[in-house]
Amino acid sequence: AQTVTQSQPEMSVQEAETVTLSCTYDTSESDYYLFWYKQPPSRQMILVIRQEAYKQQNATENRFSVNFQKAAKSFSLKISDSQLGDAAMYFCAYLTSYGKLTFGQGTILTVHP
Amino acid sequence: GAVVSQHPSWVICKSGTSVKIECRSLDFQATTMFWYRQFPKQSLMLMATSNEGSKATYEQGVEKDKFLINHASLTLSTLTVTSAHPEDSSFYICSAREDTESQRVGLTDTQYFGPGTRLTVL
């Protein structure tokens, strides 16, 4: 079974600075997808970014980018120019071949003004 | 974008009663929906996969007789918590996977999440 591990329960960053959230996973599959989701205080899950395992190029969405290291099974999220609205719980997730999402434990991100 | 609604957004009930939570895909069809449970400051735990026209598939450790799932149409799945007890109090979230022609898991397999339902059992 696939597992997803987020080793940082909490992180903080100053507004306008950059922060990186870590995620590692374990799988025996060669073709899969990875996601970062954001859950603000409203608790609505919001898709931040997705990465296809067969693509070597790291995905980027505006201020959000990933560092995908397939051999190391690492999938970190970098948030540049952090904004107060980025404060939330962030989940790394793995999409299995059965279409199920497996989530990491989550990282609470605090943004200081 | 695709929108998923949940109703109710919060509910308080007495111990021993049953509660039904609805999950609707508003602007797309979803043969498959998923139900998750989330405790405060914890991750989402998949409870079951809901399939239109067939029985739900439950994850290990989830009591299927307690958490009844019905996927009656391509836009509606319901979760009924039967004989609810205080330990069932939690935040329940559904997601819907948009039906597409491609069977390949991935970008065409995006799950859209509902806003969640907070259940409190007294």
Image (cartoon, grey):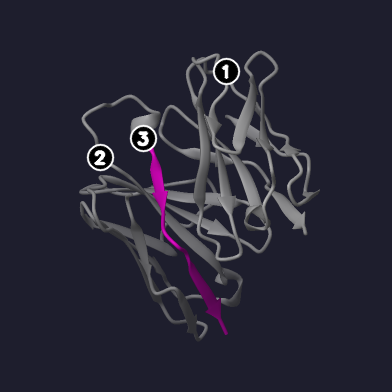
Which residues make up the magenta segment? B109-122
When the figure is inspected, residue A73 is found, relative to residue A112, above or below; the finding is above
Image-quadrant location for residue A93: top right
Q: Any mark on residue B99, and which?
A: 2
Q: How much space separates mark 1 and mark 2, taking CA atoms?
A: 27 Å
Query: To which chain does the residue with label 3 belong?
Result: B
Q: Label 3, secondary structure: give it.
A: helix
The answer to whether residue A88 shows anywhere in this view is: no
Q: Position of residue A104 (x, y in %)?
A: 64, 41
Pointer 3 with pointer 1, Cβ within 8 A: no
Q: Position of residue A46 (x, y in %)?
A: 50, 50
According to the image, label 1 marks what residue? A28
According to the image, label 3 marks what residue? B109
When the figure is inspected, residue B71 is found, relative to residue B86, above or below; the finding is above
Query: To which chain does the residue with label 2 belong?
Result: B
The answer to whether residue B53 shows anywhere in this view is: yes
